[in-house]
Image: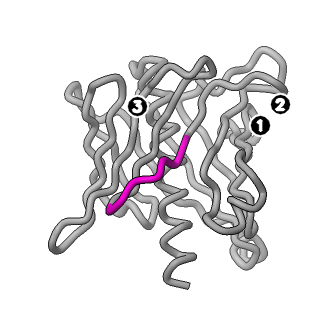
Amino acid sequence: MLAGMSVLQFNVLVFQQTRNFSKNDFAISEPNGTQVAHVETGGSTLGRMLGGARELTVFDGPGRPVLRVYDTMTLGRERMEFQDPDGNPIGNLVKRISLFKTKIDLEVLGEQLQLDGNLWGFDFNINSPQGPIAGVSREWSGMSNALFGKSTYSLRLAEWASVPQRLGIIGGVLALDLIREKQERNNG
């Protein structure tokens, strides 16, 4: 990672996932391949082995956390909460089960964002009341990466997205990946 760079200054981010049975870590790069941030799995090893990743921290550099994503325990729905390094709430993502489909609610500092497209295939857009604010698309990361449970996807952010919106959207994308991974493990 380059000194002085922040994950929050880029409008396009590439997430390279590295995953095994107890971790769900990521390298986050700008489009030219320079790593600008990383994501580490937190929580106890036993808890991760039994329930999967339950806490992720996005670091702008060594020892510089900018965002924490927590998988909170609830009955009947998935709920992920996002906080800044000081523990202040930024937003949350809730997966609700309805009669015929799954609905995802993403909220950032009281603002509801709409997710449209193939959420589980990681090909979707995120819309705010002001208009399209982000898009996510899965990228082919090669056969060997696919065999070892690694995936790559890009996040495109609107230039006008504020820092809290950027943090909430990054948290939402990571939360969706955690939910997807848990579903695969439970259906596995």
Which residue is denoted by mark 3 in the rendering?
91
| Coloring basis for residues | one colour
What amino acid is at disc 2?
Met
What amino acid is at disc 3?
Gly
Q: Is residue 84 left or right of residue 130?
A: right
Q: CA distance from mark 1 to mark 3?
A: 25 Å
Q: Is residue 72 magenta?
A: yes
Q: Residue at x 52, y 78 (%)?
A: 186
Read off the magenta span: 70-76
Q: Are marks 2 and 1 in contact (CB under 8 Å)?
A: yes
Q: CA distance from mark 3 to mark 2?
A: 27 Å
Dividing the image into 4 quarters, which one contains the C terminus? Answer: bottom right
Q: Against 154, is 50 above or below?
A: below
Q: Is residue 168 left or right of residue 100?
A: right
Residue 183, given in percent of the width and then of the height, sits at: 48, 72
What amino acid is at disc 1?
Gln
Q: Secondary structure at mark 2?
A: loop
Rendering quarter of residue 140: bottom right
Rendering quarter of residue 51: bottom right
Rendering quarter of residue 118: bottom left
Which residue is denoted by mark 1 in the rendering?
35
Q: CA distance from mark 2 to mark 1?
A: 5 Å
The mark that comes first in sequence, 3 or 2, is 2
